[in-house]
Amino acid sequence: MTRIDQEIQGQPAASRSAVALAEQVAALNARFKHHSATSVMEGALRDAGNIALVSSFGAESVVLLHMAAIIDPMVPVLFVDTELLFTETLVYQQEVSERLGLRNVHVIKADDIADKDPYGALRFSDTDACCALRKTIPLQKALAGYDGWITGRKRFQSGTRAALDFFEVEDGTGRMKINPLAHWAPEDVRAYMDENRLPRHPLVAKGYPSIGCAPCTSPVAEGEDPRAGRWRNQNKEECGIHVVDGKFVRTGA
């Protein structure tokens, strides 16, 4: 009997699964501690089970999409269309998918928007509820059956991400989150895009370094935080797709 078997013997199935996942995450972090982002992604796709790449096709998304296309063009890519995205994002999604040769892109949409937000006014009264309806809940449904998912989160993006690891346990879901770019700085992202001649999202040149839904994203002035244009003047930093302590995160990371 292995050490992990001894630790989890006699525990409920859910607890055994949680312990095993935590052990796996710890082992992967130790193994890939000094490895590159590409190696982290390769290791995740090879050793972490059934993994999807979740992409917003936003300002920096093309980096992970390019890495995935090189490793395996059939990697499942989940793209949530909130039906409030910029037209530029929708066009960019199609163009990048075709250019990189990604052959397994899934466009995810909520199936109850017509019932719960028929006039698109929910964002005025409750941005958290709007994000949950259009993005969080559809994504969580789409991730059912996957063992984990790849994100583009980076330590530099906010204080709440400062200690981000390559591999994490997603609380309350039994899944793993993989952050291959966790240790990258903004200049690393730019260098990778330049070296590989990757297409930029057209809104970046217009002052949008972080791109979400059109009604909730505004241009960023010089010297402002890159995410200042997301939910401007609101106490909100995240759309809610990340889970902490079994709850969808509405602010923070």
Image (tube, rainbow, N blue to C red):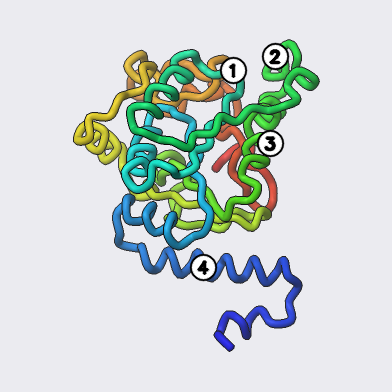
CB atoms at circles 4 and 3 under 8 Å apart?
A: no
Tell me the kind of residue under disc 1: Leu
CB atoms at circles 1 and 4 under 8 Å apart?
A: no
Q: Toward which corner of the image does residue 67 lie, by quadrant?
A: top left
Residue underneath mark 2: 120
The image quadrant where one finds the C terminus is top right
Report the residue at 38% width, 37% height from top. Answer: 65
Residue underneath mark 4: 24
The image quadrant where one finds the N terminus is bottom right
Q: Report the residue that reaches farthest toward the bottom.
A: 1
Tell me, for residue 84, which label it has, or none.
1
Q: Position of residue 41 (x, y in %)?
A: 38, 52
Q: Is residue 168 left or right of residue 82?
A: left
Tell me the kind of residue under disc 4: Gln
Q: Is residue 63 left or right of residue 83?
A: left
**Where is 7 relative to 104, above or below?**
below
Q: CA distance from mark 2 to mark 3?
A: 17 Å
